[in-house]
Amino acid sequence: MSDTSWHLAAAALDILAVDPAALGGAVLRMRASPERDRVLTAFTPVLPLRKLPISISDEQLMGGVDLGATLAAGKIVRSAGFFATPCTAVIPMAERCAPALAAKLCQLSDKGLTQGILALDEGIEADEALPDSLSDRLAFRIAPEGRMPRDWPKRPAIDAGQPIAADEAITQLTLLAARFGIASLRAPLLAWQAAQAHAKLQGRAQVHSGDIELAAALVYPHRATQVPDADAPADQQPEPEEQTQQDEGTSDTQTALPDTEMLIEAVAALLPPGLLQTLGQTRSARAAKGSGAGKLRKSNRRGRPLPSRPGRLGGDARIDLIATLRAAAPWQPLRRKHQPDRTGLLLRPSDIRTTRYAQHSDRLLIFSVDASGSAAMARLGEAKGAIELLLAEAYASRDHVALISFRGTQAETLLPPTRSLVQTKRRLSALPGGGGTPLAAGLQSAMTLAAQSAGQGMTPTIIVLTDGRANIALDGSAHRATAAEDARTVARAIRAQGTESLVIDMSNRPQPALQDLGRTLDGGYIALPRADAHRMTDAVTAALAG
Amino acid sequence: MKQPFPFSAIVGQDDMKTAMILTAVDPGIGGVLVFGDRGTGKSTAVRALAALLPPIEVVRGCPINAATSAECPDWSELETNQTEERPTPVIDLPLGVTEDRVVGALDIERALTRGEKAFEPGLLARANRGYLYIDEVNLLEDHIVDLLLDVAQSGENVVEREGLSIRHAARFVLVGSGNPEEGELRPQLLDRFGLSVEVRSPQDVAERIEVIRRRDAYERKPEAFVKRYAKEDAKVRAAIVDARGRIGAVAAGNAILGDCAELCLALGSDGLRGELTLLRAARALAAYEGAKRVTRKHLRRIAPLALSHRLRRDPLDEAGSSTRVNRTVETVLA
């Protein structure tokens, strides 16, 4: 298996070198290592390789005025964009590529201006990866496993097979993509390009079935969202049945292509392990990163201006005119001597000062408190005490606090985001208990509130206090299984939204279901089997700090 | 640069194509939001539309594409009265774009080299009378969204910064696309889009094969492929021009107005923008189809496009809001 993946990697690089523009490029997911260096040396496209740093500025990427040269020359000097000189771009540290850069690269690639992009992805976790928008446009994902075989780069032995008419090949590749649940229509197109490039590489004018097989094996596995005819649980994968029905509907094409099943096997053998388990998770985790906005940017204040500092004029730097003039002023007579014929200010790039701001984002703690009968029995009182202590701390650090309680059949926002300690305390002590546990509703209210406050520039953190026995579904019906499922769905939505969260288990015995919830939320989980308010506060403070 | 993929060669995606044509017929509808999976031809359609649209008459060298020299802003320092034909501008607004590039800023180059205070127009100026296309609009940063909200509403870009005080017309059709799995749009921005379309990969295998086949033909010989569809494209273009001339004469009776209001009431859409867009878009559709008056058939076709993004959002509603709209349409217009 591991040898196969290495040989396929070699084939992918060869094919990419033939037609990098049509194939878009590849993601090379490997840690930096001598092995990766060998892989890179094996990649020999027609055009020279050029590094595209992920910190590249707009002017460098798209072309624009070269300010430094302009100032020095006293006339406008324009710099050409990155892709003006034909080259195959290599993006190091591609897993750190911001969605903004990916968007611009997609734009360039859609306009046919790029000549292949090789993204060096050093991500470790599944959600550390190149933004999906860009990786969808790159044909291959090269992620060899295990040790590099001694004889690398040896090409996989390809049985060329029978020549295939273009129409038939396209049909086959499209069918195959549909069977693997690949929604994007770029995939079959890229696979078709790859098959053609491989045929060209082998010196054949026509595409053979072996080319198709290799192309499918290279382009499809990492895009697959389902395994054809796999015995996946029905609730996870509702689509396969639909898909097969459709395939049967077009059975005339199927009979014309007897080896589709064989192809499926070939691709299925290369599917990443654990595909089905990770499907839902990786997707939502990526989504959380996709928002691209960290705490720093989400500020509701413009921030205090910091002293300006010497800098280059890049895409996002703003010039501090006064400071720049002040820096340039003392030099004017001296510079005038050297360039007597120039009028106006004589500026050098070293005079440029840019402004900076320090931004602080306000934190909002959203407490979603389970006030159901079971929780009230257990330790609603303790929870209240703990929240009060947390409030005191929040007051000290000028955090905002919001309070949601859920009991009976619905959740209720007792207190919208506020800094008023007195009000919060009053509402909290009046918090009644009793009724069912509509956990999903509590989470949903917290989610809505978090989204609103994030829009207003706060950084929300959801803290759920519950004993975990969710028994009321979102629609208010008392059905335990539906209630648990609803809670999971909302938790996934919260995670996709990128909100930090913390689950505090206040039942007498730690609940596995709540641990799961914590994992689904991608947040912390604290079990407090026998804690007093002070210990709980300490735990929460530690979790929030970390 | 390659010629864009021809509009009429796009397979299926009728909703998206209709919505885009309608905004071309009546730019006042206020833009299209295209939400859907990757690789379903969202950006292809937008770029194709640009090539399809009839050219506009502009003053030569005018930064905001004004039609007459009187409308040209004084800061553009234009001397000429000559006009020229230009293709309808379709401006890309990439993610991560800076505020300066969007609204325009002090022309630093001129300020530093010649010591002059001049305004360098931004993307909004260039998009005037055309289209502003935002891919992955749901990932756009909040402060850029804020800028767009105001300009899209008022049709005027006001720049008050770095000692500049400038205003210029910025009337454009906003086209946004994105993948809803990656994030939601703020309701205020959603509301600015007149129509919204959900696109999915075609579920029919034959259709998918046709897509790949055409794309392949296009990649191989772009010129020949574009030529093959030039006639079709010209037909659509002529129909759009026709419809623009006819739209003023299309009647919408009281019964239709009542239907619009009832639909929006039944769906509980916020504000009156729903009714207005519904009516405008239905009228544009009627004009495009050559009808003399708006009928319920037009409303049925338009309602999901014009209303599905104006409903109260339910993040857990798997069915999608266009299903809800269709259900309501069936009951109200029964």
Image (cartoon, coloured by chain):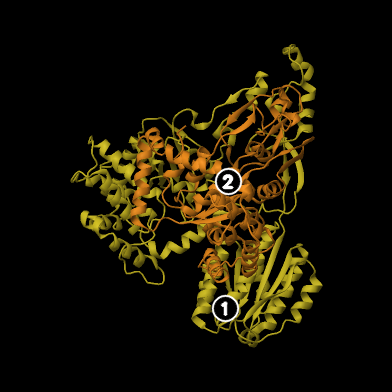
Chain colours: A yellow, B orange
Q: Which residue is mark 2?
A: B25
Which is more foreground, mark 2 or mark 1? 2
Q: Chain of mark 1?
A: A
- Which amino acid lies under the numbered mark 1 shown in the image of this protein? Asp
Most foreground residue, B238 or A204: B238
> Which residue is rendered at x = 76% and y = 32% of the image?
A321
**Is the residue marked by circle 2 packed among few (<14), some (14-19), or many (20+) residues within 10 Å?**
many
Q: Chain of mark 2?
A: B
A218 relative position to A118: left or right? left
Rendering coords of residue B136 (x, y %): 55, 50
Residue A475, disc: 1
Residue A66 in view: yes
- Residue at image point 74% right, 17% down: A335
Q: Amino acid at mark 2?
A: Val
- Residue displayed at 27% across by 43% down: A166
Q: Is residue A311 left or right of residue A135?
A: right
Figure quadrant of residue B293: bottom right
Marks 2 and 1 sit apart, C-alpha to C-alpha, by 43 Å
Picture coordinates of residue B113 (x, y %)?
71, 22
Above or below, comparing residue B271 to residue A111 in the picture: below
Rendered position, B25 above or below A424 = above
Tag 1: Cα neighbours inside 10 Å, few (<14), some, or many (≥20)? Answer: some
Secondary structure under tag 2 reads: helix
The quarter of the picture where the C terminus of chain B appears is bottom right
- Mark 1 and mark 2 in contact (Cβ < 8 Å)? no
Measured along the vertical axis of the image, is residue B261 above or below residue B178?
A: below
